[in-house]
Image (cartoon, helix red, strand yellow):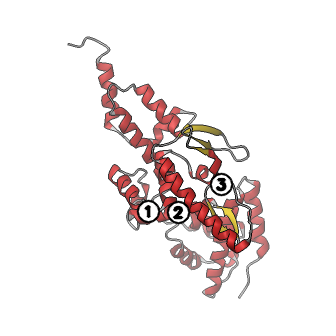
């Protein structure tokens, strides 16, 4: 059996790096391709993409049926490594149920109830659903960034080199959840100190023990926690797949519903508040995050109706 050329994988990853891919993404690409090559080797198939035939891609398609993204990465690598038939291979279609972008109120309540006994999952829910933080902002959150005395949290937002720093008020549910989370984090640090002496402790809030030392979670590690949330919610085959951004969009939609339900709401004030919640520079981006809401048009017509003496 012909073995794979390890240089082709290195060259492909270097080409991705030149196009702006970051280290975490490159590591995921490498893991996907290596797993694919092990799969081919284990079934007695060639590891050289230039020798793959349609039946080989059919085998990989079935293996990656749950991940369109992973199969697309394999196709991209195969093209780079010399395969001439990959344009004939299509990515498995995404089922319609996975296009759901929001959680309804009952699902949000069920999710909150299901995580009350787990401080880490509770914190992830309140950061995504209650504070509107992105996944990368969870990862960058430091213990010192949460100031409960002044009731504010420092959000380290978008930006590859220098994240945008924004102070925002804390959600009312955050303080008790944050204290329970810190208690669990302190127990993790204490256990690791007993095993490893006096290890350094990262400033990030979300940390875990890896090879005898404490390290921050990667984005993939936080995705695994979101997967646990999905299992608590009961998501699976044929149902919407929970994502970190789904929490963010659902929180913004619920905030809109609450603000529009207040007495005499100002529409401009409502959507400026939601824009501030999501920390968008452009209000048009904020509106794309919101689920269609009949109350939005009704409130607008009510305010328009008072502009003239119609009757």
Instruction: Pick whichever, 42 or 220, lies toward us.
Output: 220
Residue 142 picture location, percent across and down: 64, 50
Instruction: Pick whichever, 165 or 33, lies toward us.
Output: 165
Q: Earlier in the sequence, mark 3 or mark 2?
A: 3
Q: Residue at x 73, y 46 (%)?
A: 161
Query: Which of the two discs, 1 and 3, sits closer to the camera?
Result: 1
Instruction: Pick whichever, 236 or 39, lies toward us.
Output: 236
List the residue tagged with mark 2. 225
Q: Residue furthest top?
A: 309
List the residue tagged with mark 3. 204
Q: Secondary structure at mark 2?
A: helix
List the residue tagged with mark 1. 117
Q: Residues within 10 Å of mark 2 (few under 14, many from 20)?
A: some
Q: Residue 71, can we see it?
A: yes
Per the model, the C-alpha gap separating discs 1 and 3 is: 22 Å
Residue 219 picture location, percent across and down: 61, 59
Q: Earlier in the sequence, mark 2 or mark 1?
A: 1
């Amino acid at each position: 059996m012909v073995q794979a050329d390890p240089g082709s994988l290195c060259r492909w990853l270097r080409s991705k790096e030149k196009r702006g891919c970051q280290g975490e993404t490159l590591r995921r690409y490498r893991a996907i391709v290596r797993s694919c090559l092990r799969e081919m080797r284990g079934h007695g198939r060639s590891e050289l993409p230039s020798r793959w035939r349609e039946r080989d891609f059919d085998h990989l398609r079935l293996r990656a049926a749950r991940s369109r993204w992973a199969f697309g990465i394999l196709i991209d690598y195969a093209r780079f490594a010399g395969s001439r038939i990959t344009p004939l291979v299509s990515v498995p279609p995404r089922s319609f149920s996975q296009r759901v972008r929001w959680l309804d109120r009952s699902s949000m309540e069920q999710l909150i109830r299901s995580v009350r006994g787990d401080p880490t999952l509770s914190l992830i829910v309140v950061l995504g659903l209650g504070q509107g933080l992105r996944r990368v902002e969870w990862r960058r959150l430091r213990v010192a960034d949460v100031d409960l005395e002044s009731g504010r949290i420092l959000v380290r937002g978008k930006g590859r080199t220098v994240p945008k720093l924004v102070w925002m008020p804390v959600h009312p549910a955050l303080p008790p959840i944050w204290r329970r989370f810190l208690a669990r984090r302190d127990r993790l640090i204490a256990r690791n100190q007993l095993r490893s002496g006096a290890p350094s402790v990262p400033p990030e809030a979300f940390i875990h023990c890896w090879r005898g030392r404490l390290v921050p979670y990667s984005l993939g590690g936080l995705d695994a926690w979101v997967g646990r949330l999905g299992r608590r919610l009961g998501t699976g085959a044929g149902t919407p797949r929970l994502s970190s951004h789904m929490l963010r969009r659902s929180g913004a939609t619920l905030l809109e519903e609450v603000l529009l339900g207040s007495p005499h709401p100002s529409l401009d004030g409502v959507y400026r508040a939601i824009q501030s919640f999501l920390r968008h520079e452009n209000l048009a981006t904020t509106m794309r995050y919101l689920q269609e809401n009949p109350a939005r048009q009704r409130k607008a017509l009510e305010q328009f109706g008072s502009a003239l003496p119609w009757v």
